[in-house]
Image: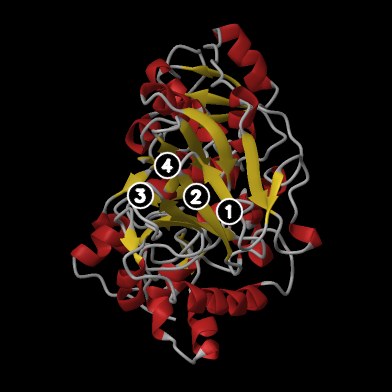
């Protein structure tokens, strides 16, 4: 058996290529959209991708299964569980609980494991030349290392009311079935630490059934479904705004993108015309360089592992946008954005310095200056971290307005006051600052040190 774990750090998303070397056949599970990585792995190991599968209709990324099928001719194997509302609306081989996929000398048995979503399935792998016992289970967003998938996304992200408690109860039943599996079976989940699909996912890439039964909180609620449901639903982070679009695009017919697009650097004239037409500018430079000089109206989303997530919060899927980025980073940035379907890149510029446009600068303050603003009636302190972080501990007097929803809550910012914003360590505050400046809030300061510096220097916190 050939096995390759493919991990996208930017979305904390795992996919898998498993092959039978004797027969030269391979299956890919939960492919990312820039799927050339699987073609390269298969070619390097004399394998042909003949099967492509998904564990569920994903919310956090745009699956590349159909792109991969278009290039390889492999068949798509997708869940037909969950009822009429949870069916993929394009050609595929439908899978039900107990079905078996054969890939050379390997078999993958389908387990219906609803909870995260009604149609979620897992795959139990047996390597028959080696043993008749199953060796791996691919759980998607069902069981993670140390956690389980959240059942509230359909309600919070997709707006399908009344689904989170039902999903939590289904998850309880699925967990009981999982606990009956042999303890030696390796668990390979769909996400790692940092994913918004769970609230406490472990950092190691895999586990075993036996280890999860003694370590994972979800297995500590034997005969206590109400307690399980309450804990599962409590404290889940805000689902990124783009999740609803992913749910839709992963279910229906859509245009395919079988190559990574190459974008052109814009001439000064071309940029100025687009800029004058108010095409949004996303500046991917680090927050320090951005603060020293940025284009009026541009939004700072730094090029790091969180780029795609924050872009998914801030951008919509109808608008074009221009990037400020280094030319040698454009391919990586394009890949990260296409993984969540943000394909409307108008072009990019490498510098903001030579455009003959007056730049703005950000007002960044230190800890002592920040302290001088606390408790003043003409000052509004805004904490742009998520609600769970705020509830766990915040600076007295700070108001919570999460950066991801800031654009929808501008009416909560007082233009007549001095506004001071902060987050944990400055990155989200830089995004929030640029959003506020774009929307005409000029009296804004950034406390870039944030809660990290505040706590390190003995700062007190309040809790809800």
Sequence-earlier tag: 1 or 3:
1
Residue located at (39% from left, 54% from top): 192
Q: Can you tell which mark lies on residue 6?
A: none
| Residue 100, disc | 1
Q: Is 423 on the left-hand or right-hand side of 261?
A: left
The image quarter containing residue 76 is: top right
Q: If you read the primary sequence from the N terminus, does the residue marked by circle 2 or circle 3 appear first?
A: 2
Residue 334, image x and y in percent? Answer: 51, 26
Is residue 43 visible to us here?
Answer: yes
N-term mark: 4 or 2: 4
Query: Callout 1: helix, strand or loop?
Result: strand
Spatial separation of the CA atoms under disc 4 and disc 3: 19 Å
Between circles 2 and 3, the one closer to the viewer is 2
Residue drawn at (38%, 74%) of the image: 392
Cα–Cα gap, marks 1 and 2: 6 Å
Residue 107 has which mark? 2
Marks 4 and 2, how far apart in space? Answer: 31 Å
User: How dense is the environment of label 4, judged by Cα within 10 Å: few (below 14), some, or many (20 and up)?
Assistant: some
In the figure, 350 relative to 290: above or below? above
């Amino acid at each position: 058996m050939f096995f390759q774990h493919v991990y996208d750090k930017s979305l904390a998303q795992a996919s898998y290529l498993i092959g039978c070397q004797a027969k030269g056949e391979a299956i890919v599970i939960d492919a990312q959209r820039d799927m050339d990585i699987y073609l390269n792995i298969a070619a390097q190991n004399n394998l042909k991708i003949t099967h492509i599968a998904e564990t569920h209709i994903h919310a956090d990324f745009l699956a590349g299964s159909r792109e991969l099928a278009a290039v390889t001719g492999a068949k798509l194997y997708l869940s037909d569980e969950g009822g009429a509302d949870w069916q993929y609306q394009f050609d595929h081989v439908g899978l039900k609980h107990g079905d078996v996929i054969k890939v050379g000398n390997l078999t993958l048995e389908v387990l219906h494991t609803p909870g995260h979503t009604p149609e979620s399935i897992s795959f139990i792998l047996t390597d028959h030349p080696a043993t008749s016992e199953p060796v791996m289970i691919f759980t998607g967003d069902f069981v993670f290392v140390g956690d389980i998938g959240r059942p509230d996304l359909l309600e919070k992200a997709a707006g399908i009311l009344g689904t989170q408690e039902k999903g939590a109860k289904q998850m309880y039943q699925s967990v009981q079935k999982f606990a009956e599996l042999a303890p030696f079976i390796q668990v390979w989940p769909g996400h790692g630490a940092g994913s918004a699909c769970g609230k406490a996912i472990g950092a190691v890439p895999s586990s075993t059934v036996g280890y999860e039964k003694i370590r994972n909180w979800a297995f500590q609620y034997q005969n206590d479904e109400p307690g399980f449901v309450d804990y599962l639903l409590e404290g889940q982070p805000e689902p990124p705004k783009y999740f609803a679009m992913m749910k839709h695009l992963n279910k229906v017919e859509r245009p395919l993108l079988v190559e990574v697009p190459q974008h052109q650097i814009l001439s000064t004239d071309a940029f100025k015309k687009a800029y004058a037409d108010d095409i949004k500018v996303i500046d991917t430079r680090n927050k320090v360089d951005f603060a020293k000089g940025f284009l009026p109206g541009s939004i700072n989303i730094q090029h790091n592992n969180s780029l795609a997530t924050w872009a998914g919060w801030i951008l919509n899927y109808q608008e074009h946008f221009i990037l400020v980025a280094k030319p040698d980073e454009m391919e990586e940035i394009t890949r990260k954005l296409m993984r969540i379907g943000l394909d409307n890149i108008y072009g990019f510029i490498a510098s903001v310095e030579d455009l003959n446009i007056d730049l703005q600068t950000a007002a960044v303050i230190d800890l002592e200056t920040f302290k001088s603003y606390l408790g003043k009636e003409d000052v509004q302190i805004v904490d742009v971290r998520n609600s769970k972080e705020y509830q766990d501990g915040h600076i007295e007097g700070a108001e919570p307005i999460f950066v991801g929803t800031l654009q929808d809550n501008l009416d909560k910012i007082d233009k007549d006051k001095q506004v001071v914003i902060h987050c944990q360590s400055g990155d989200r505050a830089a995004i929030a600052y640029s959003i506020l400046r774009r929307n005409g809030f000029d009296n804004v300061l950034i406390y870039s040190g944030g809660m990290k510096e505040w706590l390190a220097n003995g700062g007190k916190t309040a809790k809800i």
